[in-house]
Image (cartoon, rainbow, N blue to C red):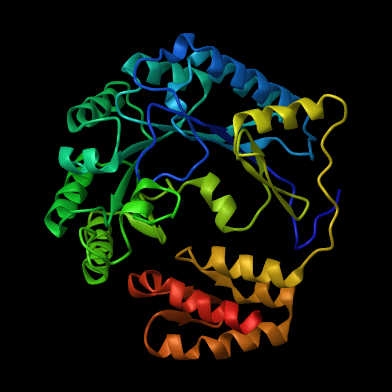
């Protein structure tokens, strides 16, 4: 099997687990709310979903290489019973194989796991945790509609330390309603005091279908002003890099050797499998997203039993690939190789891009060297949308 610049052989899989106690006010992901009273260990809808995941995996095409990264996202994957999680991993192993040195990540929320459950994760081969903290203030957690509180955050961190779970990431959100710069600084300092191997700092994005999107308009009170939001971004960059974290992607920081390898697959525009409700795949140059409701997803999986799903064959669109490569690659601190860009898309396109970005190079947002092009940190990252909009206008 050969590859082209349009696709690589996938070595990664994303598995979407849609179940949540409740929907957070900023969330537009495909989820299923089960409430606070449901016991996930004895919840038939979860058992049924796992059965369909196993079916989907078993009827998918193996394109040739064992998995090097697996990511359980959601939703709240830590609501899954261990037995169900084990079944999914076994299905992936049986279908594709899993490399001995693979990165297997799972998103977990405070209040949904114990130290014993973390040990069971380790026994299953899960070696990376992403803990959805979001804020270290109870009032902000309530504002977000989160199902956990500050006490549960500290309990969760204690569990991670008890079992010596070495590779774990903490997530924070800036730009929340009524969030002050002082609260953001406090959250950053508490993260640094815990010393995770990885930190993700996301700026609140208002989506029209979410509760926040219906309540607020960008830049208007009680949301922080654009100036304050920018100050929060610069503060995170300053404090985390001073604490020894590498700012390797617009929203992500890692200690040496602990970048998220699964997410790098996305930013490098490489192929990957996706499984579950609303999950996306990028295979053989084609992006495919599954249905975002359980019933429609189950109908899709049932259709696979008669014939393995064949990804549609469509002409490779070189312009789309170029824009995806630039949009994703410029998120990384390392940026994009000019040599590879020229090899894949030609000398003329590469030179036109360099000419276009000269003005942003002069104001310090873009760095151009003989070998690479990348955004500066923090201002290039902060104003990346301006740069990317100009790129899209040029090649549209």
Residue at image location 26% in from the left, 56% down from the top: 240
- Look at 65% across and 79% down and name the residue there: 396
Residue 114 at what x, y percent from top left?
A: 32, 18
Does the rendering let one see residue 201?
no
Q: Residue furthest left?
A: 182
Q: How many marks?
A: 0
What residue occupies the far front of the structure in this picture?
214
In which quarter of the view is residue 37 placed? top left
> In this rendering, does residue 359 appear at all?
yes
Based on the displayed image, in which of its 4 quarters is residue 60 positioned?
top right
Q: Is residue 345 above or below residue 312?
A: below
Front in this rendered view, residue 39 or 81: 39
Judge left or right: residue 106 versus residue 68: left
**In the displayed structure, would residue 331 be above or below residue 354?**
above
Q: Is residue 299 above or below residue 330?
A: above
Residue drawn 41% across and 12% down? 39
Residue that protrudes farthest toward the top in the picture: 42
* Residue 292 % position (x, y): 60, 39
**At x 51% / y 86%, what residue is drawn?**
357
Q: Nearer the viewer, residue 33 or 194?
A: 33
Q: Position of residue 119 (x, y in %)?
A: 40, 17
From the viewer's perspective, is 264 left or right of 307? Answer: left
Viewed as shown, does residue 319 lie left or right of 374? Answer: right
Q: Position of residue 325 (x, y in %)?
A: 62, 66
Picture layout, residue 70 above or below residue 172: above
Q: In this orientation, which residue lies closer to the viewer: 109 or 306?
A: 306
């Amino acid at each position: 099997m050969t590859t082209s610049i349009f696709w690589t052989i996938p070595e990664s899989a994303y598995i979407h687990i849609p179940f949540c106690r409740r929907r957070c006010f900023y969330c537009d992901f495909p989820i299923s709310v089960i409430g606070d009273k449901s016991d996930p260990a004895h919840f038939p809808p979860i058992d049924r979903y796992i059965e369909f995941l196993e079916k989907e995996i078993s009827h998918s095409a193996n394109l040739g290489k064992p998995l090097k990264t697996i990511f359980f996202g959601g939703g709240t994957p830590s609501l899954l019973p261990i037995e169900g999680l084990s079944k999914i991993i076994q299905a992936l192993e049986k279908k594709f194989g899993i490399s001995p040195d693979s990165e297997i990540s799972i998103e977990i929320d405070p209040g949904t796991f114990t130290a014993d459950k973390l040990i069971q994760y380790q026994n299953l081969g899960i070696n990376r945790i992403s803990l959805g903290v979001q804020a270290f203030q109870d009032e902000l957690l309530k504002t977000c509609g989160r199902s956990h509180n500050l006490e549960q955050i500290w309990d969760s961190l204690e569990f991670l330390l008890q079992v010596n779970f070495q590779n774990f990431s903490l997530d924070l959100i800036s730009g929340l309603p009524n969030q002050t710069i002082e609260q953001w600084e406090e959250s950053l300092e508490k993260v640094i005091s815990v010393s995770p191997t990885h930190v993700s700092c996301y700026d609140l994005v208002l989506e029209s279908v979410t509760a926040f999107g219906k309540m607020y308009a960008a830049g208007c009170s009680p949301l922080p002003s654009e100036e304050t939001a920018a100050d929060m971004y610069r503060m995170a960059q300053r404090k985390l890099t001073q604490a020894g974290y590498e700012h390797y992607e617009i929203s992500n920081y890692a200690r040496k050797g602990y970048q998220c390898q699964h997410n790098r697959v996305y930013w490098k525009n490489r192929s990957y499998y996706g499984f579950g409700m609303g999950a996306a795949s990028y295979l053989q140059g084609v992006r495919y997203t599954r249905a975002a409701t359980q019933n429609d997803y189950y109908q899709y999986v049932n259709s696979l039993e008669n014939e393995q799903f064949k990804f549609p064959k469509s002409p490779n669109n070189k312009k789309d690939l170029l824009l995806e490569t630039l949009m994703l690659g410029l998120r990384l601190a390392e940026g994009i190789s000019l040599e590879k860009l020229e090899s894949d898309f030609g000398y003329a396109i590469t030179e036109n891009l360099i000419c276009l970005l000269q003005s942003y190079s002069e104001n310090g947002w873009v760095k151009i060297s003989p070998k690479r092009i990348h955004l500066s940190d923090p201002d290039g990252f902060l104003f990346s949308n301006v740069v990317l909009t100009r790129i899209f206008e040029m090649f549209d």
